Image: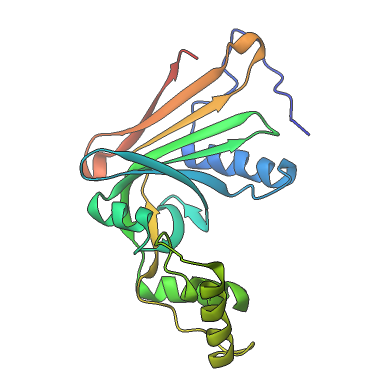
């Protein structure tokens, strides 16, 4: 159920505060209200030539150090990331009528971190990822299922499937975070946070935006 915001129409319902704390608050409410995958987010990348592409991925870790997702680095998104280590994320929680946009540079997680997450997944998911040449042409689905069956025979339930070297994770470190809240009459509420300064003097500045 959507949580109503008790605030006057001419005032912002999005506080000028720590953007990571605000994300945690909204994300917690999304986990209670969204029927499926409250951690789903659109990931936008671009080629070195500037051609954009976007797809849905799942948030698998987050905090003040950034937002983590995992993928096959040989996929289209993986190749675009490796060629241009910056991206944008979008969370859209329809049940709450809220959005959060996050922009910033990417960095690859450590091999140990990727191993830990890969082996925390259900066995069938480990098999499916190891068998997939993600984004590459597939002549027939039976070819993929044959690969899955071969790996299931080699690595039965209860065993760890070796993480493919090209299956890894990336962390987006925010340089900007924008919060959007639906308001009556399409007079929506938007507040954008941006990092300003350099080195130890980095701090968040924020301002309201016209809807």
Please state the horizontal and vertical placement of residue 199, each as a whole percent of the image: 22, 45
Please state the horizontal and vertical placement of residue 190, each as a whole percent of the image: 50, 21
Kindly identify the residue that appears in the image at 54 percent across and 86 percent down. 150
Q: Is residue 123 above or below residue 16?
A: below
Closer to us: 2 or 197:
2
* Quarter in which the N terminus is drawn: top right
Residue 156 in which image quadrant: bottom right
Please state the horizontal and vertical placement of residue 130, each as a whole percent of the image: 47, 76
Q: Judge from the rendering whether residue 29 lies leftward or rightward of residue 205; answer left or right.
A: right
Which residue of the protein is positioned furthest toward the right in this rendering? Answer: 1
Kindly identify the residue that appears in the image at 68 percent across and 47 percent down. 31
Q: Is residue 171 above or below residue 55?
A: below
Q: Is residue 210 above or below residue 76?
A: above
The answer to whether residue 87 is seen in the rendering is: yes
The answer to whether residue 18 is seen in the rendering is: no
Q: Is residue 205 above or below residue 66?
A: above
């Amino acid at each position: 159920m959507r949580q109503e915001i008790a605030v006057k129409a001419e005032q912002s319902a999005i506080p000028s505060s720590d953007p990571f704390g605000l994300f945690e608050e909204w994300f917690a409410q999304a986990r209670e209200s969204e029927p499926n995958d409250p951690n789903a987010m659109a990931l936008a990348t671009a080629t070195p030539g500037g051609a954009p592409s976007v797809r849905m991925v799942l948030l698998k870790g987050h905090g003040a150090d950034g937002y983590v997702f995992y993928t096959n680095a040989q996929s289209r998104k993986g190749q675009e990331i490796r060629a241009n280590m910056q991206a944008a994320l979008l969370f859209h929680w329809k049940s709450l009528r809220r959005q959060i946009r996050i922009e910033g540079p990417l960095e690859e997680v450590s091999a140990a971190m990727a191993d830990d997450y890969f082996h925390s997944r259900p066995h069938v998911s480990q098999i499916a990822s190891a068998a997939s040449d993600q984004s590459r042409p597939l002549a027939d689905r039976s070819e993929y299922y044959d690969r899955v069956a071969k790996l299931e025979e080699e690595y039965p339930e209860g065993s760890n499937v070796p993480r493919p070297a090209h299956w890894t994770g990336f962390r987006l470190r925010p340089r900007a975070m924008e919060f959007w809240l639906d308001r009556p009459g399409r007079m929506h509420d938007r507040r954008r946070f941006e990092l300003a300064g350099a080195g130890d003097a980095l701090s968040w500045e924020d301002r309201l935006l016209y809807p």
